[in-house]
Image (cartoon, coloured by chain):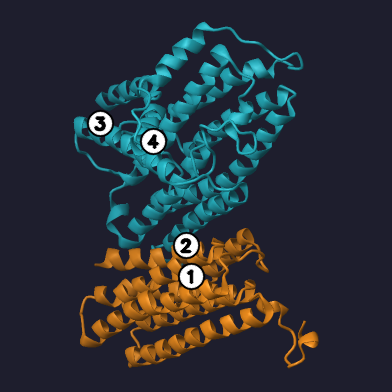
Chain colours: A cyan, B orange
Amino acid sequence: MNETIYWILWLIASFILCPLLPGIINKVKAFFAGRKGPSIFQLYYDLFKLLKKGSVISNTSGGLLKLAPCVSLAAIAVAALLLPLGIVNSPLSFEGDIIVFFYLLGTARLLTVWGALDTGSSFEGMGASREMQFSALAEAAIFGIIGCIAALTRKCDLTMLPATAFSGSISAVAILLCALAFFIVLLMENCRVPADDPNTHLELTMIHEAMILDYAGPDLALILYGASLKLWLFASFFVILLFPAIQVGLLISSLLFIGGIIATVVAVGIIESCMARYRFIKVPQMLIGAFGLSLISLFFLIFFDGGIK
Amino acid sequence: MEHLIDFILALFLITNLMMAASSRLMHCIKIVVLQGILLGLLPLFLGHIEASHLIAALLNISIKGIALPYLLVAAIKRADVCRELEPLVGYSTSLIIVLLFFAVSFWLGTKLPAEEPHLRLATPTAVATMLTGLFIVMARRKAITQAIGFLTFENGISLFGTGRMLDFGVAIELGILLDVLVLVFVMGIAVMRIKREFQHIDSDKLHFLGDNQKEAE
């Protein structure tokens, strides 16, 4: 019962704290560029500003444009209910929920794409097409990672990995490879630099930004908030992939969890500061590379760690 | 120690993937250097250090980490190329094919049980590296990339020798190392000559042998 209350507190904290993450990334980038940079609370100010504004809806829209931000945010929020937060398993988790988790995030993306197509603008259609192409490849990598987790735990649940998985040398290496593959997926799914540039408004290079150009006011606020919540979920998944399920007390696991998330986004910021965006032709290769990493770790587990002999 | 060996071998597999996907020649050379250094470090983690291991490590690192890249970089500068522009097999396809090689070699690795349990990943990694090297020799046009593919192949052979802990492994390895050194040396000179004659180093355009310039074109 104690753990359930602790998990609910972390769930509320996640909903409140997630707009900090883009702020931290921007602060890291500003530090590397030698600037002062915007405050890490900038996204909160933006969200409040946007909520007070009105919005204009395209005449060609059939209604999906207005619906998409709410539904996609709702899907991401439901996905948050399944994730182990604060390094404690979710009380709502059930057999096979890892697939539900990733497909809820997929639903959120699908709604954003539909909303983009609904505007009737060919430019947004282009962004939607790019987003779907890359996310289809990222899904292969995600399935490789799910396969590895299933091979390690013999279950398809969104739970912490058992501590024994980290003691075997091959499975420890396999987990590291999986985490690396997931980090690449994280960069692509959250439109960070090697795959997409969140700052650009240059039509040739936009993926995610191209899809949300027609939104303004409260709708844009929902989309920005949803994106930061998605980044929080991906960062937490990355953290729980790397920490074994051991009892260390709730305070220490809280510190580990928040420290892990901040470390993850700082790493994203550092990568963003010292790498250029890849050409489009290189992004599928990066994602196939991530798929390859997860496949290598799957081979390790299947052939050498008590799988098929 | 065991963790480190598995970690080095996993890094080896990652370098193979990067090799299949990178189009810049300098990047390919850096990857081969990394492989050479990893290969040199591997015998030091076997648990019992012998003099022959130390010699092999020293020679591997000094030749593969310093001498060969120096020769290759010199050849690239003289031939004035920096990219493999039109490979015979595209980079995404190459990645997928290399992944298939990994699957085959891991299956093979289970058929060839290792001498020692902590080296069980060495045989599949070695076979995967050899296959990747041979594939790069086949799938790329530029003579220099083919030389780099051959070096990868040779890294795989050395890894196989280390992993199976063969008798006289070190002696054979040093022999191969000498061969490769000579090969890269000759390759560097050949690349320069080809470049001077034909203004390019695409080996698939060199169909004819002969003194007649018109026939060769």
Q: Would you name the residue on which mark 4 appears?
A: A29
- Which picture quadrant has residue A45? top left
**Element carrying mark 1:** helix
Amino acid at pointer 1: Phe
Looking at the rendered structure, the kind of residue marked 2 is Phe
Horizontal and vertical percent for residue A180?
A: 42, 50
Report which residue position mark 1 lands on.
B106
Gap in angstroms between the C-alphas marked 2 and 4: 37 Å
Q: Which residue is mark 2?
A: A299
| Residue type of the residue flagged with mark 3 | Ser
Tell me if mark 2 has few (under 14), some (14-19) or many (20+) residues whose alpha carbon lies within 10 angstroms of its own: many
Q: Which residue is mark 3?
A: A254
Q: Work out how far the residue at label 3 is from the one at label 1, CA to CA, in angstroms.
A: 40 Å
Q: Earlier in the sequence, mark 4 or mark 3?
A: 4
CB atoms at circles 3 and 2 under 8 Å apart? no
Front of the two marks 3 and 2:
3
Q: Chain of mark 3?
A: A
Q: Quadrant of residue B90?
A: bottom right
x 61%, y 10%: residue: A55
In this rendering, does residue A159 appear at all?
Answer: no
Q: Chain of mark 2?
A: A
The kind of residue tagged 4 is Lys
Q: Residues within 10 Å of mark 4 (few under 14, many from 20)?
A: many
Q: CA distance from mark 4 to mark 1?
A: 41 Å
Which circle, 3 or 1, is nearer the viewer? Answer: 3
Q: Are marks 4 and 3 in contact (CB under 8 Å)?
A: no
- Location of the C terminus of chain A (image quadrant): bottom left
Q: What residue is drawn where x is 26% and y is 83%?
A: B53
